[in-house]
Amino acid sequence: MAKWFVLLAAVLAGCAKAPEAAAPAAAAVVTDAASPKYDGAFWKTWGDGFAELTSYDLQYPRYGSKRPGTAVSIFVAETFSNSLRVKSDPGVRDKKDEFSVMKLNLVEDFQTGVYDYNLMLQTFVAVDGVNGRPAGVTTKVAWSSQEWCGNLFKTALLDKDVLRVTSHSYFDGEGDQALSEATPAAAVLSEDALMLWARGMAWPVLKSGETREVPVLMSMQSARFKKGPRQWGTAVLSRDSTGAVDVFRAKLSDGRERVFEVEKTAPFRVVKYVGSDGLEATLVATERMKYWELNKAGGEAALEKLKLKVRASRTM
Protein backbone atom coordinates (compact mmCIF):
# COMPACT_ATOMS: atom_id res chain seq x y z
CA MET A 1 0.00 0.00 0.00
CA ALA A 2 1.28 3.44 -0.89
CA LYS A 3 2.18 6.07 1.64
CA TRP A 4 -1.04 8.00 1.19
CA PHE A 5 -1.06 9.21 4.79
CA VAL A 6 2.35 10.86 4.45
CA LEU A 7 1.19 12.81 1.40
CA LEU A 8 -2.13 13.76 2.96
CA ALA A 9 -0.40 14.91 6.14
CA ALA A 10 1.75 17.25 4.07
CA VAL A 11 -1.39 18.71 2.56
CA LEU A 12 -2.96 19.23 5.96
CA ALA A 13 0.08 21.05 7.30
CA GLY A 14 0.00 23.51 4.44
CA CYS A 15 -3.63 24.56 4.57
CA ALA A 16 -4.20 25.46 8.22
CA LYS A 17 -6.76 28.13 9.05
CA ALA A 18 -8.52 27.87 5.70
CA PRO A 19 -10.97 30.77 5.39
CA GLU A 20 -14.57 30.42 4.37
CA ALA A 21 -15.04 31.42 0.74
CA ALA A 22 -16.30 34.92 0.03
CA ALA A 23 -17.25 36.69 -3.17
CA PRO A 24 -14.90 39.48 -4.32
CA ALA A 25 -15.87 43.05 -3.56
CA ALA A 26 -16.00 44.10 -7.22
CA ALA A 27 -16.11 41.01 -9.40
CA ALA A 28 -16.83 41.26 -13.12
CA VAL A 29 -20.09 39.44 -13.88
CA VAL A 30 -19.40 36.80 -16.53
CA THR A 31 -22.28 34.42 -17.23
CA ASP A 32 -23.14 31.48 -19.44
CA ALA A 33 -26.47 29.67 -19.79
CA ALA A 34 -24.86 26.42 -18.65
CA SER A 35 -23.01 27.90 -15.65
CA PRO A 36 -23.72 26.28 -12.27
CA LYS A 37 -26.08 28.11 -9.93
CA TYR A 38 -24.18 28.87 -6.75
CA ASP A 39 -27.34 29.72 -4.87
CA GLY A 40 -28.44 29.70 -1.25
CA ALA A 41 -28.78 25.92 -1.17
CA PHE A 42 -25.22 25.57 -2.46
CA TRP A 43 -23.77 27.91 0.15
CA LYS A 44 -25.81 26.33 2.93
CA THR A 45 -23.66 23.25 2.37
CA TRP A 46 -20.35 24.70 1.24
CA GLY A 47 -20.27 28.04 3.07
CA ASP A 48 -19.94 26.59 6.57
CA GLY A 49 -16.13 26.39 6.55
CA PHE A 50 -16.07 22.58 6.57
CA ALA A 51 -14.52 20.28 3.96
CA GLU A 52 -16.02 17.04 2.69
CA LEU A 53 -13.59 14.10 2.74
CA THR A 54 -14.41 10.83 0.96
CA SER A 55 -12.38 7.63 0.84
CA TYR A 56 -12.48 5.21 -2.10
CA ASP A 57 -11.26 1.70 -2.80
CA LEU A 58 -9.09 2.16 -5.87
CA GLN A 59 -8.00 0.02 -8.82
CA TYR A 60 -5.40 1.96 -10.79
CA PRO A 61 -4.03 0.71 -14.16
CA ARG A 62 -0.24 1.02 -14.29
CA TYR A 63 2.49 -1.00 -16.05
CA GLY A 64 -0.04 -3.34 -17.62
CA SER A 65 -1.82 -4.34 -14.41
CA LYS A 66 -4.57 -3.06 -12.15
CA ARG A 67 -3.05 -1.90 -8.88
CA PRO A 68 -5.17 -1.91 -5.70
CA GLY A 69 -4.92 1.24 -3.66
CA THR A 70 -6.74 4.04 -1.86
CA ALA A 71 -8.11 7.37 -3.07
CA VAL A 72 -9.23 10.32 -0.96
CA SER A 73 -11.16 13.29 -2.35
CA ILE A 74 -11.40 16.61 -0.54
CA PHE A 75 -13.98 19.23 -1.57
CA VAL A 76 -13.97 22.66 0.08
CA ALA A 77 -14.88 26.25 -0.77
CA GLU A 78 -12.04 28.75 -0.48
CA THR A 79 -11.16 32.35 -1.25
CA PHE A 80 -8.55 32.72 -4.00
CA SER A 81 -6.12 35.48 -4.97
CA ASN A 82 -6.44 36.23 -8.67
CA SER A 83 -3.01 37.80 -9.01
CA LEU A 84 -1.19 34.90 -7.35
CA ARG A 85 -3.72 32.11 -8.04
CA VAL A 86 -3.32 30.73 -4.51
CA LYS A 87 -5.53 30.57 -1.41
CA SER A 88 -5.96 34.06 0.04
CA ASP A 89 -5.46 34.28 3.80
CA PRO A 90 -7.85 36.58 5.73
CA GLY A 91 -6.86 40.24 5.72
CA VAL A 92 -3.78 39.78 3.54
CA ARG A 93 -5.01 40.55 0.00
CA ASP A 94 -6.99 43.44 -1.46
CA LYS A 95 -10.65 42.38 -1.66
CA LYS A 96 -10.64 43.35 -5.34
CA ASP A 97 -8.04 40.62 -5.91
CA GLU A 98 -10.17 37.88 -4.33
CA PHE A 99 -12.77 35.52 -5.72
CA SER A 100 -14.42 32.29 -4.55
CA VAL A 101 -13.45 28.82 -5.76
CA MET A 102 -14.46 25.22 -5.20
CA LYS A 103 -11.35 23.17 -4.61
CA LEU A 104 -10.90 19.46 -5.30
CA ASN A 105 -7.92 17.62 -3.87
CA LEU A 106 -7.76 14.04 -5.18
CA VAL A 107 -5.06 11.79 -3.70
CA GLU A 108 -4.55 8.40 -5.35
CA ASP A 109 -1.99 5.96 -3.93
CA PHE A 110 -1.09 2.44 -5.05
CA GLN A 111 1.80 -0.03 -5.09
CA THR A 112 3.73 -1.06 -8.22
CA GLY A 113 5.88 -4.03 -7.29
CA VAL A 114 8.66 -2.95 -4.95
CA TYR A 115 7.75 0.74 -5.03
CA ASP A 116 4.68 2.89 -4.56
CA TYR A 117 3.00 5.75 -6.44
CA ASN A 118 1.61 8.87 -4.76
CA LEU A 119 -0.51 11.00 -7.11
CA MET A 120 -2.22 14.25 -6.21
CA LEU A 121 -4.51 16.45 -8.26
CA GLN A 122 -5.71 19.92 -7.27
CA THR A 123 -8.43 21.59 -9.34
CA PHE A 124 -9.87 25.04 -8.61
CA VAL A 125 -13.16 26.06 -10.26
CA ALA A 126 -14.13 29.72 -10.10
CA VAL A 127 -17.47 30.29 -8.37
CA ASP A 128 -17.47 33.86 -9.67
CA GLY A 129 -17.08 34.91 -13.29
CA VAL A 130 -13.44 36.02 -13.53
CA ASN A 131 -10.80 36.79 -16.17
CA GLY A 132 -13.40 36.93 -18.92
CA ARG A 133 -14.60 33.40 -18.17
CA PRO A 134 -18.02 32.39 -16.83
CA ALA A 135 -18.59 31.00 -13.36
CA GLY A 136 -17.86 27.29 -13.16
CA VAL A 137 -14.75 27.32 -15.37
CA THR A 138 -11.45 26.00 -14.04
CA THR A 139 -9.00 28.71 -13.03
CA LYS A 140 -6.08 26.48 -11.96
CA VAL A 141 -4.95 22.85 -12.06
CA ALA A 142 -1.92 21.39 -10.28
CA TRP A 143 -0.85 17.76 -10.55
CA SER A 144 2.07 15.87 -9.04
CA SER A 145 3.46 12.35 -9.07
CA GLN A 146 5.94 11.00 -6.55
CA GLU A 147 7.42 7.52 -6.93
CA TRP A 148 10.80 5.88 -6.48
CA CYS A 149 12.10 6.86 -9.92
CA GLY A 150 11.46 10.59 -9.45
CA ASN A 151 9.04 13.52 -9.18
CA LEU A 152 6.73 15.28 -11.63
CA PHE A 153 4.90 18.55 -11.03
CA LYS A 154 2.71 20.49 -13.45
CA THR A 155 0.44 23.53 -13.15
CA ALA A 156 -1.99 25.14 -15.58
CA LEU A 157 -3.48 28.61 -15.19
CA LEU A 158 -6.40 29.85 -17.28
CA ASP A 159 -6.06 33.60 -17.72
CA LYS A 160 -8.10 35.80 -20.04
CA ASP A 161 -7.89 34.09 -23.48
CA VAL A 162 -4.63 32.35 -22.51
CA LEU A 163 -3.49 29.05 -20.98
CA ARG A 164 -0.17 29.04 -19.09
CA VAL A 165 1.45 25.70 -18.27
CA THR A 166 4.63 25.02 -16.32
CA SER A 167 6.14 21.58 -15.81
CA HIS A 168 9.04 20.21 -13.77
CA SER A 169 10.20 16.63 -14.17
CA TYR A 170 13.05 14.32 -13.19
CA PHE A 171 12.78 12.38 -16.47
CA ASP A 172 14.98 12.89 -19.53
CA GLY A 173 13.28 14.77 -22.35
CA GLU A 174 10.94 16.56 -19.94
CA GLY A 175 12.88 18.64 -17.43
CA ASP A 176 11.66 22.20 -16.85
CA GLN A 177 9.16 23.45 -19.43
CA ALA A 178 6.78 26.37 -19.86
CA LEU A 179 4.27 27.28 -22.54
CA SER A 180 1.59 29.84 -23.17
CA GLU A 181 -1.12 29.48 -25.79
CA ALA A 182 -4.55 30.79 -26.73
CA THR A 183 -7.60 28.93 -25.44
CA PRO A 184 -10.33 27.88 -27.90
CA ALA A 185 -13.16 29.65 -26.03
CA ALA A 186 -13.99 31.51 -22.82
CA ALA A 187 -16.12 28.59 -21.60
CA VAL A 188 -13.97 25.45 -21.55
CA LEU A 189 -13.93 22.29 -19.45
CA SER A 190 -10.86 20.79 -17.85
CA GLU A 191 -10.72 17.00 -17.75
CA ASP A 192 -9.23 17.45 -14.30
CA ALA A 193 -12.50 19.13 -13.23
CA LEU A 194 -14.75 16.26 -14.30
CA MET A 195 -15.46 15.18 -10.74
CA LEU A 196 -16.58 18.73 -9.93
CA TRP A 197 -18.60 18.84 -13.17
CA ALA A 198 -20.41 15.61 -12.32
CA ARG A 199 -21.48 17.14 -8.99
CA GLY A 200 -22.91 20.26 -10.67
CA MET A 201 -20.04 22.45 -9.47
CA ALA A 202 -18.43 23.10 -12.86
CA TRP A 203 -19.50 24.24 -16.32
CA PRO A 204 -21.48 23.02 -18.25
CA VAL A 205 -24.56 21.94 -16.30
CA LEU A 206 -26.54 19.27 -18.17
CA LYS A 207 -30.14 18.18 -17.76
CA SER A 208 -30.94 14.46 -17.57
CA GLY A 209 -30.87 13.00 -21.09
CA GLU A 210 -28.86 15.93 -22.49
CA THR A 211 -25.68 15.57 -24.59
CA ARG A 212 -23.19 18.32 -25.40
CA GLU A 213 -19.77 18.58 -27.06
CA VAL A 214 -17.33 21.06 -25.48
CA PRO A 215 -13.66 22.05 -25.78
CA VAL A 216 -11.62 20.31 -23.10
CA LEU A 217 -8.21 20.77 -21.56
CA MET A 218 -6.82 17.25 -21.39
CA SER A 219 -5.80 15.82 -18.03
CA MET A 220 -2.19 16.39 -17.07
CA GLN A 221 -2.03 12.89 -15.66
CA SER A 222 -3.36 11.13 -18.75
CA ALA A 223 -1.15 13.21 -21.05
CA ARG A 224 1.91 12.13 -19.06
CA PHE A 225 1.06 8.46 -18.52
CA LYS A 226 -0.90 7.70 -21.69
CA LYS A 227 1.04 9.94 -24.06
CA GLY A 228 -2.17 11.66 -25.13
CA PRO A 229 -2.67 15.11 -26.71
CA ARG A 230 -0.56 17.75 -25.04
CA GLN A 231 -3.29 20.23 -24.21
CA TRP A 232 -6.62 20.69 -26.04
CA GLY A 233 -9.24 18.32 -27.36
CA THR A 234 -12.99 17.90 -27.17
CA ALA A 235 -15.36 15.90 -24.99
CA VAL A 236 -18.87 14.65 -25.66
CA LEU A 237 -20.67 14.97 -22.34
CA SER A 238 -23.88 13.22 -21.36
CA ARG A 239 -26.08 12.77 -18.31
CA ASP A 240 -28.51 9.90 -17.78
CA SER A 241 -30.56 8.68 -14.84
CA THR A 242 -30.58 5.09 -13.63
CA GLY A 243 -31.73 3.70 -10.29
CA ALA A 244 -30.44 5.75 -7.35
CA VAL A 245 -27.75 7.59 -9.32
CA ASP A 246 -27.21 9.92 -12.25
CA VAL A 247 -24.53 8.76 -14.68
CA PHE A 248 -22.25 11.47 -16.07
CA ARG A 249 -20.13 10.39 -19.05
CA ALA A 250 -17.30 12.17 -20.87
CA LYS A 251 -16.11 10.69 -24.19
CA LEU A 252 -12.79 12.34 -24.96
CA SER A 253 -11.45 12.99 -28.45
CA ASP A 254 -8.36 10.83 -27.80
CA GLY A 255 -10.60 7.76 -27.40
CA ARG A 256 -10.71 7.59 -23.62
CA GLU A 257 -13.90 7.69 -21.56
CA ARG A 258 -14.57 8.80 -17.98
CA VAL A 259 -17.79 7.86 -16.12
CA PHE A 260 -19.10 9.14 -12.77
CA GLU A 261 -22.03 7.74 -10.79
CA VAL A 262 -23.50 10.51 -8.66
CA GLU A 263 -26.19 10.61 -5.99
CA LYS A 264 -29.46 12.19 -7.13
CA THR A 265 -29.84 14.24 -3.96
CA ALA A 266 -27.61 16.81 -2.24
CA PRO A 267 -24.72 16.87 -1.66
CA PHE A 268 -24.46 14.80 -4.89
CA ARG A 269 -21.49 12.67 -3.87
CA VAL A 270 -19.57 10.69 -6.47
CA VAL A 271 -20.19 7.09 -5.40
CA LYS A 272 -18.05 5.60 -8.16
CA TYR A 273 -15.73 6.81 -10.91
CA VAL A 274 -14.23 4.68 -13.69
CA GLY A 275 -12.10 5.07 -16.79
CA SER A 276 -11.99 3.11 -20.03
CA ASP A 277 -8.36 2.27 -19.24
CA GLY A 278 -9.41 0.16 -16.24
CA LEU A 279 -9.42 2.85 -13.55
CA GLU A 280 -12.10 2.22 -10.93
CA ALA A 281 -12.84 3.82 -7.54
CA THR A 282 -15.74 2.95 -5.26
CA LEU A 283 -16.90 5.06 -2.31
CA VAL A 284 -16.12 3.70 1.15
CA ALA A 285 -16.99 6.51 3.58
CA THR A 286 -17.60 10.27 3.77
CA GLU A 287 -17.19 12.79 6.57
CA ARG A 288 -17.33 16.59 6.81
CA MET A 289 -14.60 18.06 8.99
CA LYS A 290 -12.10 20.90 9.37
CA TYR A 291 -9.26 18.50 8.68
CA TRP A 292 -6.59 21.23 8.84
CA GLU A 293 -7.33 21.51 12.56
CA LEU A 294 -6.62 17.80 13.11
CA ASN A 295 -2.87 17.78 12.47
CA LYS A 296 -1.82 17.44 16.11
CA ALA A 297 -1.15 14.20 17.98
CA GLY A 298 -4.44 12.35 18.29
CA GLY A 299 -5.90 13.78 15.10
CA GLU A 300 -5.31 10.40 13.47
CA ALA A 301 -8.47 9.16 15.21
CA ALA A 302 -10.55 11.03 12.62
CA LEU A 303 -9.32 8.57 9.99
CA GLU A 304 -11.62 5.97 11.49
CA LYS A 305 -14.60 7.97 10.22
CA LEU A 306 -13.24 7.43 6.71
CA LYS A 307 -12.50 3.75 7.42
CA LEU A 308 -8.80 4.48 6.98
CA LYS A 309 -5.85 3.55 9.18
CA VAL A 310 -2.43 4.99 9.94
CA ARG A 311 0.23 2.83 8.36
CA ALA A 312 2.34 0.72 10.66
CA SER A 313 6.06 1.48 10.94
CA ARG A 314 8.39 -0.05 8.35
CA THR A 315 5.70 -0.56 5.77
CA MET A 316 5.43 0.91 2.29
Image (cartoon, rainbow, N blue to C red):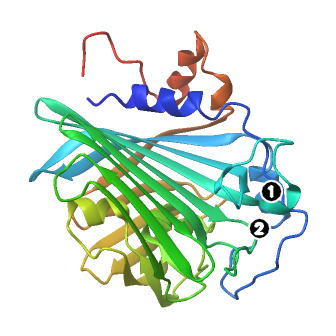
Question: Which image quarter holds the N terminus?
Answer: top left
Measured as percent of width and height from the top left, residue 287 is found at 60, 36
Measured as percent of width and height from the top left, residue 19 is found at 78, 41
Measured as percent of width and height from the top left, residue 233 is found at 36, 83
Which is nearer the eye, 165 or 274? 165
Side (left or right) of 89 relative to 307: right
Side (left or right) of 172 relative to 108: left
Type of amino acid at the residue the image marks with label 1: Trp
Residue drawn where x is 70% and y is 81% of the image: 132
Which is nearer the eye, 241 or 18? 18
The residue carrying mark 2 is 38
Type of amino acid at the residue the image marks with label 2: Tyr
Which mark sits nearer the N-terminus, 1 or 2? 2
Can the viewer see residue 242?
no
Q: Residues within 10 Å of mark 2 (few under 14, many from 20)?
A: some
Side (left or right) of 38 relative to 70: right
Residue drawn where x is 19% and y is 53% of the image: 61
The residue carrying mark 1 is 43
183, above or below 124, in the image: below
Find out whether the residues at labels 1 and 2 contact each other: C-beta distance under 8 Å: yes
309, above or below 84, in the image: above
Q: Residues within 10 Å of mark 1 (few under 14, many from 20)?
A: few
Element at badge 1? Answer: helix
Element at badge 2? Answer: loop
Q: Residue furthest right?
A: 25
Q: CA distance from mark 1 to mark 2?
A: 7 Å
Image quadrant of residue 208?
bottom right
Residue drawn where x is 62% and y is 69% of the image: 200
